[in-house]
Image: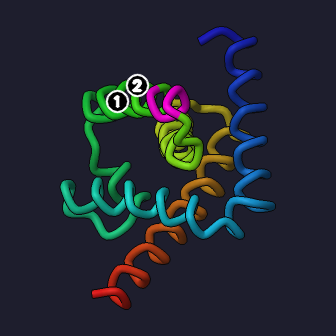
């Protein structure tokens, strides 16, 4: 990745984190989608949290999932499902951040993963109440 691409990614990551903290955490539908997708993946990997699931994934798993998220995000956006596209973007950005080494990105990854883990907990609590 070039220096320019790395700097562009830092902007994307910072913008997403800012948006999640300002609006996303108040948007229950978006957070439930983030949590639901993370929950499905955690179930497949037998992990308790998104952070743990990422640590358990192989590099090949990361690559495959990033590609699947990119395709799904594009499809959701094209078909007008913006909340789903947003959820996939958050998870995909977390995966990309895990491949970077700069201290700023690593710190941003940790913040993003905390939001995703909270969304996962919200999804699980909501699912238990409705069961």
Vertical comparison of 119 with 81: above or below: below
The residue indicated by pointer 2 is 71
| Closer to the camera in the image, 47 or 126 | 126
Q: Which mark is residue 42?
A: none
Residue plotted at (72% across, 50% down): 17
| Closer to the camera in the image, 2 or 70 | 70
Vertical comparison of 44 with 3: above or below: below
Instruction: Tell me the crowding category of disc 1: few under 14, some 14 to 19, or many 20 or more residues within 10 angstroms, Cα based.
Output: some
List x then y, in percent, for residue 117.
49, 66
Picture quarter with the C terminus = bottom left
Vertical comparison of 131 with 123: above or below: below
Residue plotted at (33% across, 34% down): 65
Main structural element of the magenta stretch: helix, strand or loop? helix
List x then y, in percent, for residue 27.
66, 65
The residue indicated by pointer 1 is 68
Would you say the residues marked 1 and 2 are in contact, meaning their CB atoms lie under 8 Å apart? yes
Horizontally, residue 125 falls left or right of residue 30, namely left
Colour scheme in use = rainbow
What segment carries the magenta color? 75-79
Question: How far apart are the alpha carbons under marks 1 and 2?
Answer: 5 Å
- Secondary structure, mark 2, is helix
Residue plotted at (47% across, 39% down): 95
List x then y, in percent, for residue 49.
38, 66
| Closer to the camera in the image, 49 or 21 | 21
């Amino acid at each position: 990745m070039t220096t320019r691409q790395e700097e562009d990614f830092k902007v994307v990551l910072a913008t997403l984190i800012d948006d999640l903290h300002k609006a996303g955490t108040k948007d229950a539908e978006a957070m439930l989608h983030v949590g639901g997708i993370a929950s499905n993946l955690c179930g497949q990997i037998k992990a308790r949290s998104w952070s743990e699931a990422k640590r358990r994934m192989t590099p090949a798993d990361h690559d495959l999932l990033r590609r699947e998220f990119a395709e799904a995000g594009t499809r959701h956006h094209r078909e007008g499902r913006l909340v789903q596209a947003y959820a996939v973007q958050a998870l995909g950005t977390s995966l990309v951040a895990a491949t970077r080494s700069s201290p700023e990105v690593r710190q941003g990854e940790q913040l993003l993963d905390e939001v995703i883990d909270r969304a996962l907990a919200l999804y699980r609590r909501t699912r238990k109440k409705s069961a």
